[in-house]
Image (spheres, rainbow, N blue to C red):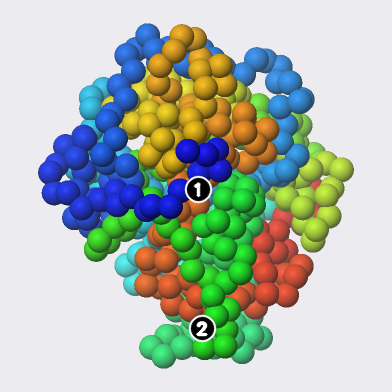
Amino acid sequence: MTRAGQHASTPRSHGATTRGLDHVAGSRLDEGRFGRMFRRLPAYLPDDERIAAVAAVMAEPSPPDPAGDNDAIPAGYTYIGQFVDHDLTFDPVSSLERRNDPDALTNFRTPRFDLDSVYGRGPRDQPYLYDQADGRSLLVGEHDDLLDLPRNGQDTALIGDPRNDENVFVSHVHLTMLLFHNRVVARLGDFPEAAPQAGEDAFAAAQRVVRWHYQWAVVHDFLRRIVGEDTFDDVLPREPLVRGGREVERPRLRFFNWNRQPFMPVEFSVAAYRFGHSMIRAGYKLNTTVPGLPVFTSEPIGEADPLSHFGGFRRLPPFWQIEWRRFFEIEGKRDPDLQPTRAIDVHIAPPLLALPPEEAPGMASLVRRNLVRGARLGLPSGQAVARAMGVEPLSGSELGLPGRGPAPLWYYVLREAQVLAGGRHLGPVGGRIVAEVFLGLLAADPSSYLRTDPGWRPFLPGAEAGDFTVPDLITFTGFGLDEV
């Protein structure tokens, strides 16, 4: 075993047909289902006392230590991660009160990077998402001299996934994606590469351009930052294969395998991909005018001062338009007011330890909720997953938990990033899970750029020809670039 996680054989994680927490039939999972990457590993079932002990270690002191910032990742990528999560997964069924069988859970999002959270079921099935003036553009709200998500008379957002109104930052990401689509529609004729392909109308062509540029940015900008260069290059090598005179990308998957349809691994959705919770800052500065505020309030949302937090499910107050320069390096410039994420580590910001009842009914601490959910879904321990990957597990002293024994997979992924990568990106276990799921889902999607045309390169304007980043996407829309 090595810390780098290299080993020669590729274990087949799926194929059995026995149902149950320890035997999930990965090969029989249909699209839209949850399952396991490591179904042969035993469940780790910490008791309530152990969960409480782990949760106590994960509480970040208040006020936060400035040394806990991660200058390698600007703060906006936290909410790109949340948006991507909502694009891939939605589980309204599993319970914190009982054990759950992943094979019996339905993922109410398609496990694809297809922006179904933006497009819904399309202009015919959900016409209220679209501008009927042309039938191709998405509706955008406007009030008080600012842009907002489209809303009804009760200020409920009319969008493909209501979770993208959970906070002001993810709502601005969703709004930016609406504007990105509309900008592509408006400029479709400017790019010969965007011409409709066989069987496409103008809407389908615009949708393809939007999706493929989004997928590229998610992989080559967001994912690369999150998992680190070494893991990224191992799963998606820097030296692409050559086919028909063109360089193509082919991911190398060792642990995420399926026979018929890809699925959503619970090791990813319930543990590894929850790294983003540790990146959340205790407070943010939205723009020049609005003071620094926390994302959440511990009070019931209806009772809290609406100008005291950045919680969502409401129309944006006046002057609450985002300045993206505070969240991303726009046009390659690192603004003096740019806010970094917090380090990827086991310390969770205080606002997440006391969520309002609307956000966390019955259990206010996000840390406890994540740990309990992992136990209820029977996730293996972090050490067991590391060994299955051929990675030397963290030692007891490196884990930093009271006593000896297994560590919950979510905690392990965060601690591994802290110990082995200084909190700048995920370690070999967490990074490999996230990279393989991202690239495996893309490779399996018959409409993705990676499956349809693996030699494709972005053509919309960006800082570098043939590349496209999240800041490039923002710049293309022209939104959030002015001082408020």
Which residue reaches farthest left?
18
**Could you say where residue 314 lies in the image, as x and y percent from the top left?**
53, 40
Q: Residues within 10 Å of mark 2 (few under 14, many from 20)?
A: few
Distance, label 1 to label 2, CA atoms, is 27 Å
Left or right: 45 as drawn, with respect to 308: left
Viewer-side residue, 222 vs 379: 379
Left or right: 88 as drawn, with respect to 301: left
Q: Amino acid at mark 1?
A: Gln
The image's mark for residue 20 is: none
Return the residue at label 2. Answer: 243
Task: Classify mark 1: helix, strand or loop.
Answer: loop
Can residue 251 be seen here?
A: yes
Say if 144 sits above or below 337 in the image: below
Say if 216 sits above or below 258 in the image: below
Viewer-side residue, 454 vs 276: 454
**Could you say where residue 456 lies in the image, as x and y percent from the top left?**
56, 78
Q: Amino acid at mark 2?
A: Arg
Can residue 312 be seen here?
A: no
Task: Classify mark 2: helix, strand or loop.
Answer: strand
Say if 18 sits above or below 446 in the image: above
Identity of the residue drawn at 68% across and 74% down: 466
Say if 469 sits above or below 279 in the image: below
Return the residue at label 1. Answer: 6
Identity of the residue drawn at 51% across and 18% down: 396
Identity of the residue drawn at 13% across and 49% down: 17
**Could you say where residue 16 lies in the image, as x and y percent from the top left?**
17, 49
